[in-house]
Image (cartoon, grey):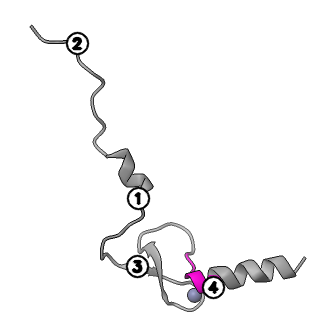
Amino acid sequence: MDPAPYCPAPDEDPLRALTPATDDGPRAPCTHCTAPTEYPADAPGAPLCPVCAWQQAQRGACSG
Ligand SMILES: [Zn+2]
């Protein structure tokens, strides 16, 4: 006799979605200086490297 079934485990480990990509896959180039970012190449949007992201944040803060 089978025990009461639990909810089936999802195919994807939810923790994977919360963990930054740490593999050696291709990185998306920064849209400003083409330096490799910390985002995977298939990340949506326009990724910026930490330097450009910081500079853009500074510009935004000063252009008000
Ligand atoms: Zn950059």
Q: Which is more N-terminal, label 4 or label 1?
A: 1
Q: Pointers 2 and 1 in contact (CB under 8 A)?
A: no
For the record, the magenta segment spans 47-52
Q: Which is more N-terminal, label 3 or label 4?
A: 3
- What number is the disc on residue 19? 1
Q: Pointers 2 and 4 in contact (CB under 8 A)?
A: no
Q: Which is more N-terminal, label 2 or label 3?
A: 2
Rendered residue at 17%/12% (across/down): 3
Q: CA distance from mark 3 to mark 2?
A: 45 Å
Q: What amino acid type is highlighted by mark number 1?
A: Thr
Q: Position of residue 42 (x, y in %)?
A: 42, 69
Residue most extreme to the top: 1
Rendered residue at 31%/46% (across/down): 12
Q: Which is more N-terminal, label 1 or label 3?
A: 1
Residue holding disc 2 = 4
Q: What amino acid type is highlighted by mark number 2?
A: Ala
Closer to the camera, 54 or 10? 54
Q: Position of residue 50 (x, y in %)?
A: 57, 81
Residue holding disc 3 = 27
